[in-house]
Amino acid sequence: MVSFDEFKRIELKVAKILEVEDIPGKDKLYKIKIDLGNEQRTIVAGIKPFYSKEELIGKNVIVVANLEPAVIAGVKSEAMLLAAKNKAGQYSLVTIEGDVEPGTEVE
């Protein structure tokens, strides 16, 4: 169980998806470039079975921005997308509608 104080340390931010690429040989993974307002980062995410590249580009999503980078499938991943998993095992990204700038902190 995560304590409230531990949860408060998680940095959630709005990010805009700029680019989406396939990762050769990986059926579930995308390499995604995001805009966090003051910087751009790369994320590796296992959402390929649920979203086309075209559906993702331009979406405002929520990311965990203060994780240690990890190398996934040979690509440095510098944040994590938030998604919900339904009973059928399908993922839906947590997105933001409206006029919210990339880099905005989620409170």
Image (cartoon, rainbow, N blue to C red):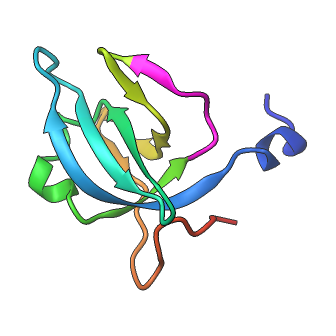
The residue under the point 86% across, 45% down is 4
The residue under the point 71% across, 45% down is 10
Toward the viewer: 76 or 44? 76
The residue under the point 47% across, 46% down is 82
Provide residue 99's location: percent of width, then percent of height.
Answer: 43, 85
Toward the viewer: 2 or 81? 81
Q: Label the magenta part by its dominant secondary structure.
A: loop
Residue 67 within the magenta-colored segment of the rendering: yes
- Give the image quarter of residue 49: top left
- Give the image quarter of residue 24: top left
Provide residue 79's location: percent of width, then percent of height.
Answer: 49, 39
Q: Does 29 sit left or right of 21 as displayed?
A: right
Residue 74 within the magenta-colored segment of the rendering: no
Image quarter in which the C terminus is found: bottom right
- Give the image quarter of residue 67: top right
Toward the viewer: 66 or 26? 66
Q: Does 81 sit left or right of 59 as displayed?
A: right
Question: With respect to residue 6, does 75 lie above or below?
Answer: above
Q: Which residues are magenta?
A: 65-71
Image quarter in which the N terminus is found: top right
As drawn, the residue found furthest toward the bottom would be 99
Provide residue 13's location: percent of width, then percent of height.
Answer: 56, 59
Provide residue 78's location: percent of width, then percent of height.
Answer: 48, 35
